[in-house]
Image: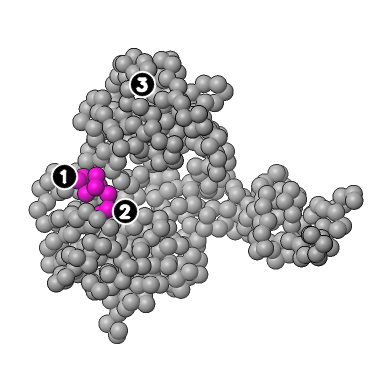
Amino acid sequence: MANTMLRQGNYSIKGSPAQRRGYACQGGRIMPKLPVQTGQLVRLSIEGITHQGEGAAKLDGYTVFVPYAAPGDVVLAEIISAKKDYARALIKEIFAPGRRTEPRCPWHGECGGCHLQHLDYTDQLQVKTEAVKGTLKRIGGIDPALVAPMLPTRAWNYRNKLQAPAGLHGGQLVVGMYKPRSHDLVPVGDCPIQHQLNSAVSGAVARVARETGIAPWNEETLQGTLRHVVVRHSEHTNQTLVTLVVSKLDFPRRQEFLASLREEIPHVHSLVLNENPRPTNVILGDREEVIWGPGYITDTIGGLQFKISSRSFWQVNPEGTEKIYAVVKDFAQLTGREVVLDIYCGAGSIGLYLAGQARKVIGIESNPSAVRDARDNARLNGIANAEFHLGRAEEVLPKIAAGLKADVVILDPPRKGCAADLLEAVARVSPERIVYVSCNPATLARDLKILEGRGYLTRAVQPVDMFPQTYHVECVVLLTRDRQT
């Protein structure tokens, strides 16, 4: 059948008459058809932005999500997937731009690292605030009025950590970013959200690798040497740590490569080789060799010093970190008499930041190297009222909680949120206040609902824009014990 065009409301829909009648024949049975089909071109008016940074439009009541669309855009888009309740589409043409701005990065929309660079920063803050409100209300039943406006941070060149895979592009070794949902490498050079020194160092590593004949790792053949370049920089101390992930610590032309690097990046405080020979998406391997320097850098928060090694978890936005920790301290309401439980404590930064206003800090962390860093950081800062325990929090907490009166619990879990049995254990400790630091509003909402069912009330939610130009957001939440339960 010949394709025809049919006008439906404000949208032009391309397809055959049989496609538009709403039914399809499959295996001899008549099946209800989806409102759109893969490959179909549709005209859409973008109404808003989702919590994952995609534009949202309605097509006769059916939702279509469009990456890199802005509110008010009128676009021609191609359907790339269609399900019962929604479809996804890619912009083919912008008929009328809405509230959009020109992206600063030439790779925007290709590398997948930034989702909102086409929006003005003021609009980004508003979109993210509304997304947090919607997610907490929909999943956790949290009153949107408890959510404060997003705290802004520096919008550009804020990231203190670069983690870039190496590969071939145009027949030569480059480092860059993978396209979304693929391992196709985009040779991102001067990334506008990275600290400029990070981009310069990664570019220098790639250049020296090309000049000395170092081959990139090939995940299909399991051949090659250089897998990832990881750069960490502290603006406070002006120290830089470079970790090169290689398939073997001993590789061809190693001496020439490292000598050339020493000449090319003499300002780098420390260089580490990390060996990862496994066919895995996990970046770091188990063996390391320090080539020069101490193998770590020092960074500061609130006047405290912290050792940052290749394996240390450390927030990537220094200004945002200071703002988050200030909110945590405000919510904790410490007087110097409290016992603080810092769960998922990492290298101990939050607990140590609070230690000066607490009677005692007890940290729990499952990563052995992070616990070592936390103990080192306590000694480095002369903090004697903090202790750190190794193990899964849901297993360690019940053991150390017997007879313990914890006044404040700090929760700072990974994106998957807290395990249900951990939340049960926290409720049994019965702290007066819980301060929850989250990087995922969806799992935060789920966990708040559980805690509210265990006798706690959500009192305040402060979102912080730790990741400008992306849809990611951090939230700090205060919960207090419900005296009526």
Residue highlighted by disc 2: 323
Mark sitting earlier along the chain (2/3): 3
* Residue 113 can be seen, yes or no: yes
Q: Residue at x 29, y 85 (%)?
A: 484
Element marked by disc 2 = helix
Q: Quadrant of residue 55?
A: bottom right
Q: Which residues are magenta?
A: 365-373
From the viewer's perspective, is residue 297 above or below residue 303? above
C-beta proximity under 8 Å, tags 2 and 1: no
Q: Residue 312, percent across and down?
A: 28, 43
Residue type for callout 3 = Phe
Disc nearest the viewer among 2 and 1: 1
Question: Is residue 312 found left or right of 30 in the rendered image?
Answer: left
Front residue of 106 and 172: 172
Q: How is the image coloured?
A: one colour
Residue highlighted by disc 1: 376
- Disc 2/disc 1 C-alpha distance (Å): 24 Å
Question: Is residue 266 found left or right of 117 in the rendered image?
Answer: left
Mark sitting earlier along the chain (2/1): 2
Front residue of 73 and 369: 369
Residue highlighted by disc 3: 251
Element marked by disc 1 = helix
Residue type for callout 1 = Asp
Look at the magenta stretch and give its main secondary structure.
helix
